Image: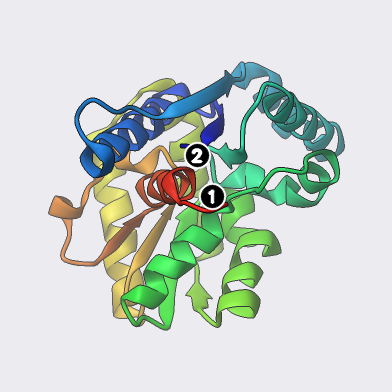
Amino acid sequence: MKTIGLLGGTGWESTVDYYKTINTEVSKILGKEHSAKIILFSIDFFEIGSKIVKNDFESLGKYIAGVSKNIEDAGADCLVICANTLHMFEGQILEQISIPFIHIADATALKIKEKGMKKVALLGTQPTMEMPFYKNRLKEKHGIEVIIPSGEEITEIHKIITTELLHSIFKPESKTFLLSIIDKMAKLGAEAVILGCTDFPLLISQSDTKTILLDTAEIHAKAAVEFAIRKNE
């Protein structure tokens, strides 16, 4: 079994879900006596949150790339970042590491294609929804059409993530708002909605809506397990 390198802490609660999902899947596939080999580097979210507030993405990218290198040096066989937004730094990360980088959008795209879907909606932080690193990857690499909410809705979703979910605050009205957006995206033709923030499942779940939800944290974690137990590599 290969060793999975996790870069977590953004936020820590969703990182717990990664750890639990990975070990649960390994145990399910290999037997109850098995658990995953994991190296976890959990960052202090304040260190990156303060850079995001200042729009200091240059130094943030260098920091994330440096942490990624530390994970490789510690003995990890792959890198898994337990957050969607930080995948914007893929280029800087790949300059620092030589181990496989399991991209969350690629793992999600494979699940979308398995279901035969062509058009999905993307919810996440403002950078995840508005910047090209996620949407363009799905479209250009995987041929998947992506729609996003309106500008005002994006602002509100980002606020819910950064001022509530990352601080373990779960408001019923925020859940209602997110579910209304999901319903709207479905009416606009989305065959599924990507929960492009790994903290979303802390507030909403598939039982809350008839629209198919793609839990990127779960999908990503299972992709890491598939890599770790794959033979002949």
Which residue corresponds to the image point at 50% horizontal and 67% vertical from the top-left?
148
- Who is closer to the viewer here, 173 or 44? 44
- What's the CA distance linking mark 2 and mark 1? 6 Å
Which residue corresponds to the image point at 36% horizontal and 80% vertical from the top-left?
117
Q: Position of residue 219 (x, y in %)?
A: 38, 52
Q: Position of residue 26 (x, y in %)?
A: 31, 38
Q: With 221 as the anchor, is 131 left or right in this view?
A: right
The residue tagged 2 is: 159
Which residue corresponds to the image point at 40% horizontal and 60% vertical from the top-left?
194
Looking at the rendered structure, the number of numbered marks drawn on it comes to 2
Kindly identify which numbered label has been placed on residue 9.
Answer: none
Q: Secondary structure at mark 1?
A: helix
Which residue corresponds to the image point at 65% horizontal and 78% vertical from the top-left?
140
Under mark 2, the amino acid is Lys
Q: Is residue 152 visible to us here?
A: no
Q: Secondary structure at mark 2?
A: helix
- Who is closer to the viewer here, 225 or 164? 225
As drawn, 204 above or below 117: above
Q: Position of residue 195 (x, y in %)?
A: 40, 53
- Who is closer to the viewer here, 31 or 12? 31
As drawn, 221 above or below 107: above
Under mark 1, the amino acid is Thr
